[in-house]
Amino acid sequence: MKFTVAELDQEAVDFDESLAPGMIDFVEEMRQVGPLHAAGRADLLKEHRGPQEIVADIRVRAALQTQMEVPCARCLEPVVEAVDTTFDLLFRPTGVDNDGVDRSITASETEIGYYEGDGLLLEDVLREQVLLALPAKVLCSEDCKGLCAECGRNRNTDPCTCATTPADPRWAALQALDLQARSRVKP
Ligand SMILES: [Zn+2]
Ligand SMILES: [Zn+2]
């Protein structure tokens, strides 16, 4: 779905879209599970920057819900993560802010992006918002044991013997000494 400046100049556009997996290209290691639902409004805001200069900004406000499958940060197994977010964004024409003047006038309420040509694709906005809404680190469970650093096996499902090799008793003795020494220097 594309919002064009010409169309928004006539009237605001209300949308209520359900996008099937595949309609938005996500980065390779993540996959949309089930439909992505987005409902909101796009309208045009005209910034009067001088007697001659009017900048046409596209504002998009919406609520968005979907489910994404992303790899666990430790064991790389797929994890389904729910995304449920709202956003309020302002898009300016590309290049209009290249005069070095700080224009972050209403940045407290709205964030600034840019659109190219005659308008903005809703799919592009949604892709970015889904990526922003996902946690930086997704875990399959809080106590995921991850992959073995020695043999690379998934230690949750395929316990290996590398990790269970008992530590050398001589090191254990040294560690005990070290702990004693440290507790002694404490005031
Ligand atoms: Zn995991
Ligand atoms: Zn191992």
Image: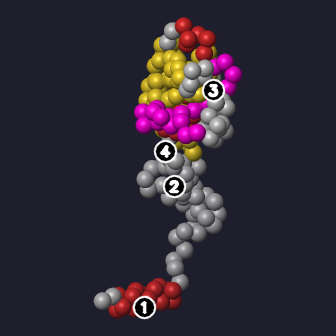
Query: Disc 1 marks which amino acid?
Result: Leu
Q: Main secondary structure of the magenta part?
A: loop
Farthest right residue in view: 117
Q: What residue do we see at 54% from left, 57% from top? A: 146
Badge 1 crowding class, 10 Å Cα cut-off, few under 14, some 14 to 19, many 20 or more, is few
Callout in the foreground (4, 3): 3
Q: Which residue is mark 2?
A: 156
Q: Amino acid at mark 4?
A: Pro
Q: Determine whether 30 is above or below 49 in the image.
A: below
Residues at marks 4 and 3, CA–CA distance in whole angstroms:
30 Å
Reading the chain from its start, which is encountered first: label 1 or label 4?
A: 4
The amino acid type found where label 3 is placed reads Pro
Labels 2 and 1: the sequence-earlier one: 2
Residue labelled with disc 3: 93
Three-letter code, disc 2: Asn
Rendered position, 109 above or below 10: below
Q: CA distance from mark 4 to mark 2?
A: 22 Å
Which numbered marker is on residue 135? 4
Q: Residue drawn 51% across and 20% down?
A: 45
Name the secondary structure under disc 3: strand
Whether the residue carrying mark 2 lies under 8 Å from ligand 1 is answered with: yes
The mark closer to the camera, 4 or 2, is: 4
| Front of the two marks 2 and 3 | 3
Q: Quadrant of residue 30?
A: top right
Q: Nearer the viewer, residue 134 or 176?
A: 134
- Which stretch is magenta? 101-119
Residue in the picture at 59% in, 62% down: 148
Q: Earlier in the sequence, mark 4 or mark 2?
A: 4
Label 1 belongs to which residue?
177
Percent x, y for residue 178? Answer: 44, 89
From the image, which quarter does the N terminus lie in?
top right
Q: Secondary structure at mark 2?
A: loop
